[in-house]
Image (cartoon, rainbow, N blue to C red):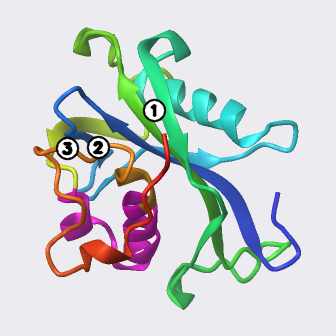
Amino acid sequence: MIDSKGFRPNVGIILCNDEGRVFWAKRVGADSWQFPQGGINQDEDPETAMYRELWEETGLESSHVQVIGRTRYWLHYKLPNRYIRRKSLPLCIGQKQIWFLLRLVSDESSFRLDCTDSPEFDGWRWVDYWDPLKDVVFFKHNVYRKAMKELGSLLVSDAIPISPQGYLASSVRRVEQ
């Protein structure tokens, strides 16, 4: 399902633990790391897609997590020209994403990376909240930064800086509780 501008609807998931560290997953067979994410099917709303993707990629069910928040608007990224499949129609030039912030409320033993015939990840670790900005593939960096800034304001504590080094803390929108 591609929209009229060439963007595929998608969800992204930032999963944190009680210390505010985030789940960072290694893509199968590569030295590439990312947050869980995936496409929204035609019969799904973003939240339904998020729970499906969460289970497919991590083995976690809705009872294993608490939804803390989601981005207010779609966040877009364009694919580099070399990744655009010009022969596929409709043409997909990138993704538009709704991001969710979840907290793990179960034990880590609930994780399973082999729930599908084609697992997305073959490893994972907890990392400090802003660390993914150092490792994510370049064309997703701006979307990660926007999602993490918007949703990170829901986790602000003494242990989690309000913004990554190099970004102005005053530009972060606080969410009223």
Q: Is residue 68 magenta?
A: no
The answer to whether any part of residue 113 appears in the image is no
Q: Amino acid at mark 3?
A: Ser
Describe the element under mark 2 as helix, strand or loop: strand
Describe the element under mark 1 as helix, strand or loop: helix
> Which of the 4 image quadrants contains residue 43?
top right
Chain-order first, disc 3 or disc 1: 1
> Which of the 4 image quadrants contains residue 101?
top left
Between marks 3 and 1, how big is the CA–CA gap?
28 Å
The answer to whether any part of residue 147 appears in the image is yes
Circle 1 residue: 57
Q: Are marks 2 and 1 in contact (CB under 8 Å)?
A: yes
Residue 13 in the figure: left or right of residue 132: right
The local crowd at label 1, few if under 14, some if 14 to 19, many if 20 or more residues have their Cα within 10 Å, is many
Q: Position of residue 147 (x, y in %)?
A: 45, 61
Circle 3 residue: 157
Q: Which residue lies most toward the bottom here?
A: 81
Q: Amino acid at mark 1?
A: Glu
- Which labelled disc corresponds to residue 25? 2
Residue 4 in the figure: left or right of residue 26: right
Residue at point 35% right, 52% down? 152
Q: How many discs mark residues in the rendered view?
A: 3
Q: Position of residue 8 (x, y in %)?
A: 72, 63
Where does the magenta region start and end?
Answer: 130-149
Residue at point 62% right, 80% down? 84
- As drawn, 167 above or below 8: below
